[in-house]
Image (cartoon, helix red, strand yellow):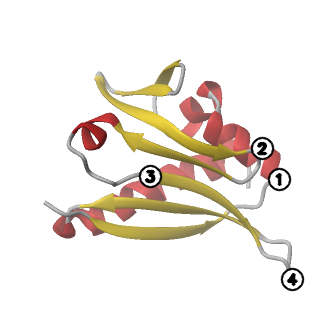
């Protein structure tokens, strides 16, 4: 079943370096996104309350974005991914995190709410 792409823009007052560190390192991700993460080469195993999800890091650019693809989607031939991107407004210098993700049509709102909760954790962790 085709999943629907969605985006969330979430303002966070923090430096690009700090944000990127929180998105791209095991310790950073474990602060806000999951309970723990294990990395072998480009494969990240995210752990939450005894369950785990495995994703491949497909691309990244320092201080700009990280993009992951769930292994399950990869094996099914789906082109879905999730991306965490740092946006800086040229005029105001304000920063935001832009999440791009995919969900079943009837689960998009729940997925957005989950991301917003995660991003609020991130904001709390970095004091932004």
- Residues under labels 2 and 3: Cα distance? 20 Å
Is there a contact, CB below 8 Å, between mark 1 and mark 2?
Answer: yes
Give the percent coordinates (x, y) of residue 67. Answer: 53, 48
Check residue 18 in the rendering and tell me which mark sits there, or answer none: 2
- Residues under labels 4 and 2: Cα distance? 21 Å
Vertical side of 69 occupied by 86: above or below = below
For marks 4 and 2, the one nearer the N-term is 2
For marks 3 and 1, the one nearer the N-term is 1
Provide the residue designation for mark 1: 15
- Residues under labels 1 and 2: Cα distance? 5 Å
Nearest to the eye among marks 2 and 3: give it. 3
Is there a contact, CB below 8 Å, between mark 2 and mark 3?
Answer: no
Give the percent coordinates (x, y) of residue 87. Answer: 71, 66
Is there a contact, CB below 8 Å, between mark 4 and mark 2?
Answer: no
- Residues under labels 3 and 1: Cα distance? 22 Å
Give the percent coordinates (x, y) of residue 121. Answer: 55, 47
Residue 93 versus residue 69: which sits nearer the camera? 69
Provide the residue designation for mark 4: 91
Q: Which residue sits furthest front?
A: 77
Pointer 4 local density, CA inside 10 Å: few below 14, some 14–19, many at least 20:
few
């Amino acid at each position: 079943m085709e999943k629907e792409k969605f985006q969330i823009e979430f303002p966070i007052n923090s430096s690009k370096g700090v944000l990127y560190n929180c998105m791209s390192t095991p310790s950073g991700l474990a602060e806000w996104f999951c309970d723990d993460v294990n990395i072998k080469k480009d494969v990240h195993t995210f752990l939450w309350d005894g369950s785990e999800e495995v994703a491949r890091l497909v691309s990244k650019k320092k201080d700009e974005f990280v993009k992951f693809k769930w292994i399950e989607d990869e094996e099914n031939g789906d082109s879905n991914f999730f991306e965490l991107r740092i946006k800086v407004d040229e005029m105001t210098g304000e920063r935001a995190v832009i999440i791009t993700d995919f969900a079943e049509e009837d689960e998009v709102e729940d997925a957005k709410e989950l991301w917003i909760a995660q991003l609020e954790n991130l904001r709390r962790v970095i004091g932004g």
